Amino acid sequence: MTTILFFTQCKPDSKDEAKEETTVESPEAATEGAQAEVLTPEDIAKQKIEGLPTTTIEWVKTEHDFGDIKKNEKVSTTFEFKNTGTSPLIIAEAKAGCGCTVPHKPDEPIQPGETGEIKVEYNGSGNGKVTKFVNVILNTESQTEKLTITTNVLPEEGQ
């Protein structure tokens, strides 16, 4: 009897890779010969909300378990929230750690008292128990919220 095991890994899209960096050089650095500051995508997103009035958010849920799914089965869930503060809620970024999980955030500000949602799609890659995170950058006191999805990816039939 021969047993064959396959291992897969979700790979980040090159444009979404967590280590992606952008170099921003200030005029002072250029004239003084100092090293340029290196900003992560998260730093850049936080700059978008820097100086904005903060607000508060209330999530209906921040975790979702898809249960058992078939390998490569595409699934999605929606994370609903309400702006419970007095200033418009700005979501600067919603980013997953790899390309197998894709969040869709609202483009427009969510006004005080109004609701919004972030849809998260997962492509069913991986094997067994899978946990994925979406980091949300927004103009709240903490500036960062984490959404979590989990599932159990069943092996393809015949494996």
Image (spheres, grey):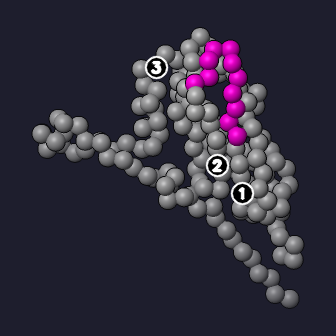
Q: Is residue 143 above or below residue 21?
A: above
Q: CA distance from mark 2 to mark 3?
A: 27 Å
Q: CA distance from mark 2 to mark 1?
A: 9 Å
Q: Are marks 2 and 1 in contact (CB under 8 Å)?
A: yes
Q: Secondary structure at mark 3?
A: loop
Q: Earlier in the sequence, mark 1 or mark 3?
A: 3
Disc 2 residue type?
Val
Q: Which residue is identified by label 1?
A: 123
Q: Which residue is identified by label 2?
A: 102
Disc 3 residue type?
Leu
Image side of residue 133 versus residue 66, left or right: left
Circle 2 packing at 10 Å, graded few (<14), some (14-19), many (20+), is: some
Q: Which residue is identified by label 3?
A: 52
Q: Residue 51, located in which quarter of the rendered image?
A: top left
Circle 1 packing at 10 Å, graded few (<14), some (14-19), many (20+), is: some
Q: In this rendering, does residue 108 appear at all? A: yes
Disc 1 residue type?
Asn
Magenta-drawn segment? 109-119
Q: CA distance from mark 1 to mark 3?
A: 35 Å
Q: Are marks 1 and 3 in contact (CB under 8 Å)?
A: no
Q: Residue 148, located in which quarter of the rendered image?
A: top right
Outermost residue on the bottom side: it is 1
Residue at horizontal 45 percent and vertical 52 percent from the top: 19
Q: Position of residue 60 (x, y in %)?
A: 76, 27
